Image (spheres, helix red, strand yellow):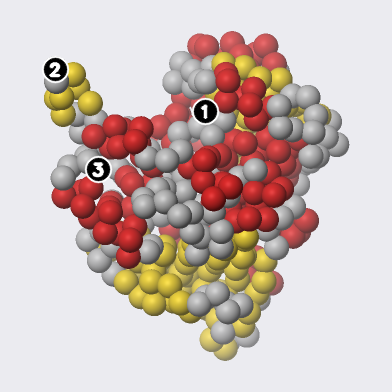
Amino acid sequence: MKKVMIIGAGGVGSVVAHKCAALPEVFGEIMLASRTLSKCDQIAATLGRTIQTAQVDADNIPELSHLIRSFQPELVMNLALPYQDLTIMEACLATGVNYLDTANYEPPDTAHFEYSHQWAYDERFRQAGLMALLGSGFDPGVTSVFCTHILKHHLDTIETIDIIDCNGGDHGQPFATNFNPEINIREVTAKGRYWQDGQWIETAPLSEKQQFELPEGLGNMNIYLMYHEELESLARFIPGLKRARFWMSFSDNYLKHLEVLGNVGMTRIDEVEFQGQKIIPLQFLKALLPDPASLGPLTKGKTCIGCRIWGHKDGLKKGFYIYNICDHEECYREVKSQAISYTTGVPAMIGAKQMLQGHWQGAGVFNMEQLDPDPFMHDLNLYGLPWKVVEL
């Protein structure tokens, strides 16, 4: 039995706490830490076993290091904001503890994400004999493992990957985001970018659109080309990859609200002066929007996230669609959270499980594509995210 520290008490942190608490044979002792202790205590009160809670500022390396030393976990699971990835990695290096996160580092003042900031830590983690696992969510995370599973079991080479993230859920609110509003809106309003023939091609935000027919009778949805960080790691670790794109569904209602908010300056991430104080409009907007954690009991419908992958097998061109469907209401019944948090939290728990049980091990900084997909794929079926493969 191992000790694990979970940092972050939002929707994903709550799911991870529930799923880890349900596996005492793997996660022997758990500490849940956040800037707001009351959130940790509220989550802890809903679990089927006792866990420790603590208050910590994840931006404060000495404070975080002191907490880690006092608890002595084998693994720190970073479910805080992407802005805090580097400070938490520094604290793990200072205390000799392995690290896991679900999203790559993002500078607070620039809506731009890339792995270079965290890949730069590879040598330091190697020298310390520690493992850092990056992006163990769904996308990034499961989508990358889907690709390596197809490469291992169905294709000799992969040429093109289209990751398609569709959310058919309805929460009944005029406008809300399914995860942290600040991160969500920064991501959606950024320029699109995809990998093709050895170079990155940029597009205007949400300027490329397709209609996608979902499997299992879930209907059709409009999907829009975006940039997502797993494209960068796929381009690096899938040999011979010619093209990789990421698509996400949005309702017309969501896009209209986002357009209006953008037009009036509410999605800006630079400081403006208001009544003698400096504020960031997007952070102010976040305070006005519904807390994503409050959407759990309201949301109905299903998510469908998967990859359409083309390549060659025995000289013949073949394609596969590998996907998961997740029901918002079933997630809420199990862990009191909607499917967006669930589909990120369950893979975080599974990635941690692989590390603690020694299925995934090594010294350095690792992306999901570098590791054996089989034990992870096995656990997806066991712990709430069953997947299917269809030949195209």
The number of callouts visible is 3
- Kindly identify which residue carries mark 3: 267
Say whether residue 308 is left or right of residue 107: right
Pick the residue in front: 52 or 76.
52
Which is in the foreground here, disc 2 or disc 3?
A: 2
Q: What residue type is labelled 2?
A: Gly
Alpha carbons under labels 3 and 1: distance apart: 29 Å
| Image position, residue 222 (x, y; %) | 38, 71
Give the quadrant of residue 366. Answer: top right
Q: Can residue 275 be seen in this view?
A: yes
Quarter holding the N terminus? top right
Q: Which amino acid does label 3 sit on?
A: Thr
Q: Which of marks 2 and 1 is in front?
A: 2
Report the disc number at residue 276: 2
Q: Is tag 2's residue or tag 1's residue first in the polypeptide sequence?
A: 1
The residue beneath circle 1 is 89
Which sits earlier in the primary sequence, circle 2 or circle 3? Answer: 3
Instruction: Answer above or below: position of 81 versus 206.
Output: above
Image point 49% across, 18% down: which residue?
Answer: 57
**Under tag 2, what secondary structure?**
loop
Q: Position of residue 216 (x, y in %)?
A: 61, 77
The amino acid at mark 1 is: Met
Disc 1 residue crowd, few under 14, some 14–19, many 20+, Cα 10 Å: many
Q: Is mark 3 on a helix, strand or loop?
A: loop
Distance of label 2 from label 1 (alpha carbons): 36 Å
Choose between 327 and 194: the one closer to the eye: 327
Question: Looking at the image, which residue is at 61% across and 14% down?
Answer: 67
| Circle 2/circle 3 CB separation < 8 Å | no
Horizontal side, residue 106 vs residue 276: left or right: right
Tell me where residue 386 appears, x and y as whole percent.
Answer: 70, 63
Query: Within the image, what quadrant is residue 45 found in?
Result: top right
Can residue 372 be seen in the rendering of this structure? no
